Image (tube, rainbow, N blue to C red):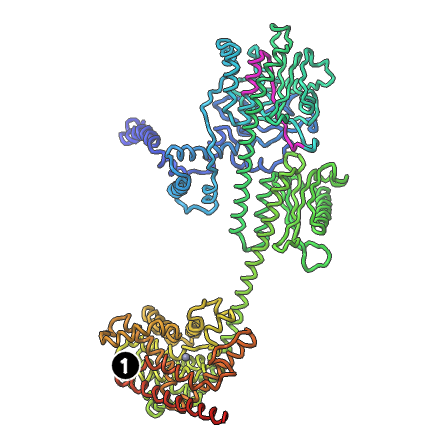
Amino acid sequence: MWKNDGKNSMVNDMTQITLSVVEDWLDSHPDYCQDYFLRKIELDFINKWLVSHGFLNINDYISSATSPSSSGNVSPANGLVATPSTGTSPNNTPSILVNGGNNSLSVSQMYRSNSKRCRRHDFARAKTRSVLRTQEIGKDVPICSSRRSSLKDMRKFTSLPPSPISMLSLLIDSKVRLPRWPVPAHSADAKRDLRRTQGERDFFLTAVRDIATDLDLKSLSHKIVDNLTVLLDCDAGSLFLVDGPPRGSMRRRLVSKVFDVHSGARGRFLLPDNVPRDAGDSAAAADNEVQIPWGVGILGHVASTGETVNLDVACEDPRFDDEVDRIMGYYTSSLLCMPVKNSYEDIIAVAQINNKNPDKDDGHFTSMDEKLFETYLQFVGIAITNAQIVEDSRAEYDRNRNLLEVVHDLFEEQTSIDKVIMKIMQRAQRLLKCERAAVLLVDESCDSTRFSKLFDLNSPKHTKNSVKNSRQKVEGENVSRYLESLAERVACSGEVLNINEHDCNEGIVDSGINSLLAMPIRNKNDQIIGVASIINKLNSLPFDEYDEQLFEAFTIFCGLGIHNTLMYSEVEKAMARQKVSIEVLSYHATASNKEVERILGMPVPAVDSLNLYSLAFDDFSLNDDEMLMAAVSMFLELGLVKTFNIEKETLYRFLITVKRNYRDVPYHNWRHAFNVAQVMFAIMMGCDMKNTFSDLEVLGMFVGCLCHDLDHRGTNNSFQEKARSALVLLYGTTNTMEHHHFNHAVMILSSENLNIFSSLSAESFSTVMKVLKHSILATDLCMYFQLRNKFFRLIESKEYSWDEDSQRYLLMAMLMTSSDLAASTKQWHVQQRAARLVTDEFIEQGDKERFELKIQPQALMDRERQHELPQLQIRWIADICLPLYQSLGQMNPKLNVMKEGALSNMQQWSKLVDENYKNANHEQK
Ligand SMILES: [Zn+2]
């Protein structure tokens, strides 16, 4: 029907064409392809891919990483095998033989590691890594840049910003490149043919070369067994590696990586009935590892004694344990078993060959065979040693990588102890492959060892089983109590407990603990703050030295994590405390409504009635209230209230608050601030300088004068530095106090009902704040010394232009200093009184330096040298004040009053010097 529909068939055709075109296009654009999949792919899709390539799907992998090892069925696609193309039923999947066969092997006789899944995972990871690697090798670029390029690649391929953990994992990617020779894997049959054509001697060399370049223990073992059976013309062979620590035979065992590889001499695989005899499956089955306890059977005998065992009829020998035969359903008649040694003559493996070709030597292994076997095993020893070194370094690398990831967690999570501990212990549980992990924190408020908190992590399977019924619950409580008693022991003694099944007392064996490792967690002062324990390794083995080492790293991380988190919460608390105290203080430091109301009713005095236009204004002529009202009056006169729409109440409240935030020190108090503002007012209004500046600049400078010494403590910058005061920590050593004055001003202005800048636009606001900061920082004499020569030269050259921002800002700074130092230009009685107050303040600082800081104060602060005041004042005026006032007078003759005042005061001080001199002479006579 829809063939007639032109549209539809067209769409159909297009789809046909497009699909093949698309596939071609994708093939030729791998970058785009990868990018697309990284962005679009769903987990489901990944699982399908994994399963179709013989891996576990993600969920199964996760549960397998934490599940106990009792189940023997560890086929690659466990439970998901029904991939229709292979046609095999789930029962026929290549699971290995341990529980399935009609054998009677008990667990104690033989352990099976289920690390296969993990190795599979590693293998998958190694594969992805090697993709990167080959790319890098191909480009032939140095390591650091290739590292960067892989980061770049990652950024390119992901639409999300890269997370620190993925960046980290790329950075710590191993850059060790293992040699990879293309090694053709010959089947045993092909090798047999080769032996026939090459002859025994040449085939021996081929067999040596075959194993010399293989660094993977599994495929190496496979090759060794194949080569041995061909070389010695026998039916089967096996290779068991010695595993476990060299001392303490308890934990030593023999492990075969290729247990079930039997080359069928007569083209027959000797496998039990329920295992498929498909040749393709043998490789998958070969994935399984078999362990035999130390000292069991002929293998164990050879491993522990190093003797060669050559038997014509194996079953007649009392040492013969038919473990292999029983598993394989195989009958062994002749047998040759020999140790494999490394260059230190240590036994590192045992090789065994079975059933010599019955057509040769009556099916017996001859002394020639022994000789050949021994010679080949020497090469086997070298190859195994190399492969083991590579395997160890891989494990080392993985361990370091995992530990680095824990470090990452530590830095990422510092907000709660619970989260930090859970994260670290989850990683410990995963990396150490155990059922359970627990952390107990010591309760510091208790004298006896008590624990304030218990973190208990169970692997998912364990949890499922353990909360099933009340009996088990009671058991769980018993276990908790037992754990707590062990933890108490560790917390008191600081010892590391490594307990295995045999050490556990009866009650505990019942409750399912078969191994336990407990360690103290210490803080940076080495005090024990908790105990961490891990329980039951998933492979049912006891915890070994390697586990102890690794777990110790985790407990150190735990200690660090707890420390960091406590520090973080301390900082948070300190911040909260500070916030509260600022709230409290600012309430008390702000003008109360009552106060504001009181002066709101007062009349504002006329500016000229108070002599405010004059540079000769008397600093001590007004009382506190009068100064406040005079400040209001100046604000009005400068036009600032009108121009900037300042509300009357806000202005009053602001001025009262500024006044309140000056301390009751002899000189740098509210009166000084007011006097400085008055001088600035007089310069602006009385000497026609106002039009040099914008209204915003006038506002900033005038407010700057009022605020320029806010919260002055009567001590100068160098005192702050010598005393290492908090202000230095906060603002550093340059312009310390001035930064504080400015910040204090900002704090006041940031209050809604004190903000006299509130009606300014954002732009104007930022300008006025910039001027305010510039003005206040300019009152640091250090700043003045830095700037003044530039200013003097500018005035000298008469080439100044105040329209230019930088020059105008320079002028602002100079006017701020001239206002700040103006006491030296006032009438003699004002100058004398001001000098006295400054001296009082200096002497108080000098006393603090002498008695608190234990240092000798400089002359002008030294109580003992107060009589030197006149000389010091002369130098002060001559060196610091006069040059500025001379220069300003040159610029604007109306400012010459200040220079003249300063000169006159110098004369007065010299008179005093003379008088003092006369008096001193008189006294001497
Ligand atoms: Zn000042």
**Residue 29 to residue 635: above or below:** above
**Residue 673 to residue 5: above or below:** below
Pointer 1: residues within 10 angstroms few (<14), some, or many (20+)? some
Q: Position of residue 752 (x, y in %)?
A: 42, 74
Q: Position of residue 748 (x, y in %)?
A: 44, 75
Query: Which range is magenta?
Result: 223-246
Label 1, ligand 1: CB separation under 8 Å? no
In the rendered structure, the answer to whether residue 722 lies left or right of residue 252 reads: left
In the rendered structure, the answer to whether residue 373 lies left or right of residue 156 reads: right
Closer to the camera in the image, 258 or 651: 258
Q: Amino acid at mark 1?
A: Met
Q: The residue tagged with tag 1: helix, strand or loop?
A: loop
Magenta-colored stretch includes residue 689: no
Quadrant of res 479: top right
Quadrant of res 45: top left
Measuring 67% from the left and 56% from the top, which residue is drawn there?
Answer: 443
Magenta-colored stretch includes residue 238: yes
Ligand 1 lies in quarter: bottom left
Residue, disc 1: 689
Closer to the camera in the image, 779 or 56: 779
Q: Position of residue 147 (x, y in %)?
A: 42, 41
